[in-house]
Image (cartoon, rainbow, N blue to C red):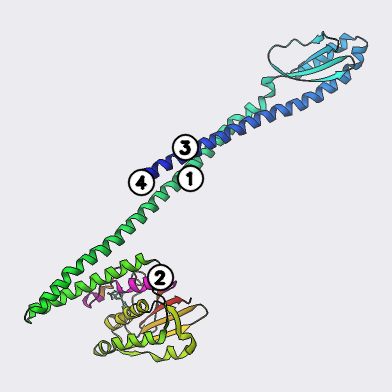
């Protein structure tokens, strides 16, 4: 497959160069033909003029005058021939070599004026050097451009292939990891409770959650448009998330406030076409983060609509995220240094952002004054 593509690339390159050479050859040929045409036009004018001048000397057989005109033409490197229409030469300049000639009638005679072919084509040969050079530079430049594009194209293909491999590998690996982990968790449940079994259960559960998150992110990245869209009430989704986290929030000393923002939205607008399960998952990740990492006392969930967007906001009054870390928090496995002691895999925000992007939106961070964080999940309304 890969070498096949390489062969086609080579054929395309050779074809492009042959094409360029043909165009170049035809251009030179046309240029040369034009130079000769211009020369012939001048020669014809000169022949007509000479015929006019020779009319009288020929009629009176004034050969001295004819010789003078021939000499004048010779000074311009032109040759003169005069032929009788009844046949036979009357006058012929002493000139050897190939010439380009044009003739004009003059009574019973035909007057021809000629110029050596090397003289006719001189402007062409004078210009040819520069012409060939600029054409070569042009071909070379095109070659470089073509080669650069080709290399970029090969690189992009390779990166896409690696990205596909990475996604598939993570998905397969996490999937395979889950089976033995479920076995371990099942086996631990059969053992009598002790400090050791509690530790094994805790670590195995963490590992299982990590595998689930990795699998989920890989599936989301692979999903493309594979969302299960349905008409859902956004207020219901947010209230459901609040209920789910109510007791954990309470034990962490943080209150979840859900009313204000939602009351701003007109009832009709609360129904939106989206993947209900995924959006609940994204909002849950943000709420869980505020509970585990913010250290705040108040968490506010709100939803707002504008023309084309539904904005879901999860804000807290906690420590916030330092400016230097804000760019990186959406990367997979990235965790802010001080959060290393709290549970988490560093995948929550990456998952939430993937879900937002699959909905034609995004997830962004806005700092809250004087302290705290606001995560904005924007979704395109369909
Ligand atoms: P994790 O699994 O660690 O929660 P995330 O991708 O969800 O991973 O978050 C990345 C990091 O961003 C977290 O480790 C935490 O340090 C920081 N973070 C996320 N939300 C908040 C928040 N509301 N307040 C303070 N820090 C946060």
Report which residue position mark 2 lands on: 358
Q: Please tell me which residue is depicted at 32% across the width and 82% down the height of the picture.
A: 287
Report which residue position mark 4 lands on: 2
Q: Is residue 374 left or right of residue 137?
A: left
Q: Crowding at label 1, few (<14), some or many (≥20) Cα neighbours within 10 Å?
A: few
Q: Is residue 163 left or right of residue 248?
A: right
Gap in Å between the C-alphas at discs 2 and 3?
42 Å
- Mark 2 or mark 1, which is nearer the start of the sequence? 1
| Circle 2/circle 4 CB separation < 8 Å | no
Q: Callout 1: helix, strand or loop?
A: helix
Mark 3, mark 4: which one is toward the viewer? 4
Q: Callout 2: helix, strand or loop?
A: helix
Gap in Å between the C-alphas at discs 1 and 2?
36 Å
Indicate whether 115 appears above or below 17.
above
Gap in Å between the C-alphas at discs 2 and 4?
31 Å
- Mark 4 or mark 3, which is nearer the start of the sequence? 4
Tag of residue 145: 1
Q: Could you say which is closer to the camera, residue 284 or residue 185?
A: 185
Q: Is residue 257 left or right of residue 180?
A: right
Report which residue position mark 3 lands on: 14
- Mark 1 or mark 3, which is nearer the start of the sequence? 3
Question: Which span is picked out in magenta?
Answer: 339-362
Q: Callout 3: helix, strand or loop?
A: helix
Q: Please tell me which residue is depicted at 35% across the width and 76% down the height of the picture.
A: 278
- Mark 1 or mark 4, which is nearer the start of the sequence? 4
Q: Where's residue 374, x and y in %? A: 38, 81
Q: Where's residue 222, x and y in %? A: 35, 64
Q: Could you say which is closer to the camera, residue 208 or residue 95?
A: 208
Q: Crowding at label 4, few (<14), some or many (≥20) Cα neighbours within 10 Å?
A: few
């Amino acid at each position: 497959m890969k070498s096949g593509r390489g062969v086609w690339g080579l054929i395309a390159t050779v074809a492009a160069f042959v094409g360029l050479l043909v165009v170049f050859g035809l251009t030179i040929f046309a240029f040369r033909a034009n130079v000769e045409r211009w020369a012939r036009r001048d020669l014809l004018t000169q022949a007509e003029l000479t015929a006019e001048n020779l009319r009288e000397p020929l009629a009176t057989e004034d050969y001295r005058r004819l010789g003078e005109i021939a000499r004048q033409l010779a000074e311009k490197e032109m040759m003169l021939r005069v032929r009788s229409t009844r046949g036979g030469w009357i006058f012929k300049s002493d000139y050897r070599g190939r010439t380009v000639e044009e003739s004009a009638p003059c009574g019973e005679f035909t007057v021809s004026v000629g110029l050596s072919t090397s003289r006719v084509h001189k402007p062409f040969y004078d210009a040819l050097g520069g012409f060939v050079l600029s054409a070569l530079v042009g071909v070379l430049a095109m070659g470089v451009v073509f080669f650069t594009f080709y290399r970029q194209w090969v690189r992009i293909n390779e990166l896409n292939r690696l990205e596909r491999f990475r996604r598939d590998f993570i998905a397969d690996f996490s999937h395979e990891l889950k089976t033995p982990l479920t076995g371990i968790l099942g086996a631990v449940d059969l053992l009598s409770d002790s400090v050791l079994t509690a530790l094994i259960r805790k670590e195995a559960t963490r590992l299982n959650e990590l595998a689930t998150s990795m699998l989920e992110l890989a599936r989301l990245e692979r999903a493309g448009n594979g969302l299960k869209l349905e008409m859902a009430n956004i207020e219901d989704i947010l209230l459901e998330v609040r209920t789910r986290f109510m007791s954990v929030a309470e034990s962490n000393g943080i209150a979840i406030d859900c009313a204000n923002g939602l009351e701003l939205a007109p009832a009709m607008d609360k129904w939106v076409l989206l993947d209900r399960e995924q959006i609940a998952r994204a909002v849950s990740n943000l709420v869980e983060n505020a509970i585990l990492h913010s250290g705040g006392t108040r968490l506010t969930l709100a939803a707002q609509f504008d023309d084309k967007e539904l904005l879901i906001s999860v804000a807290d009054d906690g420590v916030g995220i330092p400016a230097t870390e804000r760019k990186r928090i959406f990367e997979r496995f990235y965790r802010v240094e001080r959060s290393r002691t709290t549970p988490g895999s560093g995948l929550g925000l990456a998952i939430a952002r993937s879900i937002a992007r699959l909905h034609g939106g995004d997830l962004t961070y806005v700092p809250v004054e004087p302290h705290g964080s606001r995560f904005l999940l924007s979704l395109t309304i369909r």
